[in-house]
Image (spheres, rainbow, N blue to C red):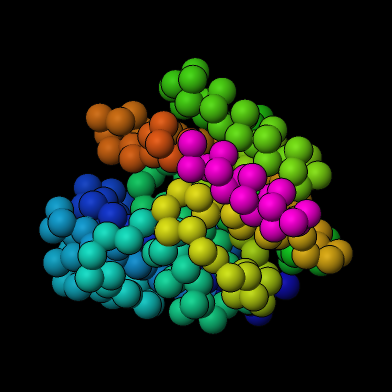
Amino acid sequence: MNNYTLSVIIPCYNEKNTIELLLDSVRQSQIKGNLEIIVVNDGSTDGVQALLDGPLRNKIDILVHHPYNQGKGAALRTGIQHATGDYVIIQDSDLEYNPQDYPKLLEPLLSQKADVVYGSRFKGGDSHRVLYFWHSLGNQFLTLLSNMFTNLNLTDMETCYKIFKREIIQGIDIQENRFGFEPEITAKLSQLKNIRIYEVGISYSGRTYEEGKKIGWRDGFRAIYCIIKYGFIKRFI
């Protein structure tokens, strides 16, 4: 199946040093369909807006600027609203996730087996940069807690790489503005009748905090709150 379009939602906040490489990498991904690249500049202050409006503009199909920083979830909500492709994938604007993994993420969708596919950093034999033990343990704990409330058996709920049929993701009311997007969307997907969720292993080249990694311990506590709010309260109360 080659007559499809993949909408790539790229939230961008102060990623001046990586955004051009990322855009080139997305364009070079080996998918057989068409690409629709949507960048949401979330109130960046590092000069990336001038790059996006200037020399990089022809690499982007849809560009939206938030007047001030609202958070990753808010940027994704904006990008998803603008998507017109058959499928929608989330792509961070750093270089931690490799767009060359798009074909394997698309395969369960194109073969009509899945409605949503998660790319797992903890599944399969792809290469991974070795970084923080406690960060990895925290991700696994949040996935376990999420699974307990959603009754899913995911290995990586917090992954950036989630790819959806467009009508499914556009039909979900996204409320979280920051990194609570991941547990919120997972909980709400799990509550959809007859939803088919697949998971495939992906490569991962994580960044250090010196290299610009933004997620911290406060986001971890917010994720716990979101797991309980959307996974338990919304389901049972």
Residue drawn at (62%, 45%) of the image: 227
Whether residue 196 is visible, yes or no, is: yes
Which residue shows up at 44% across the image and 21% down it? 132
Residue 12 at what x, y percent from top left? 32, 58
Front residue of 93/34: it is 93
> Residue drawn 56% across and 23% down?
137
Quadrant of the rendering where the C terminus is positioned: bottom right
Towards the viewer: 134 or 116: 134
The quarter of the displayed image where residue 148 is located: top right
- Name which quarter of the figure residue 66 lies in: bottom left
Residue 123 screen position, x and y as percent: 68, 33
Is residue 68 depicted above or below 236 in this figure?
below
Instruction: Provide residue 128's location: percent of width, then percent of height.
Output: 52, 29
> Residue 214 placed where, x, y %?
33, 40
Is 223 in the magenta?
A: yes
Horizontal relation, residue 184 to residue 116: left or right? left
- Could you tell whether 74 is left or right of 155 in the image? left
Is residue 7 left or right of 106 when viewed as pictured?
A: left
Q: Quadrant of the N terminus?
A: bottom right
Judge whether residue 169 is colored magenta: no
Residue 106 seen: no
Q: Residue at x 68, y 35 (%)?
A: 145
Q: Which region of the structure is painted magenta?
A: 221-237
- Which residue is farthest right? 194
Our reading of the magenta stretch's main secondary structure is helix
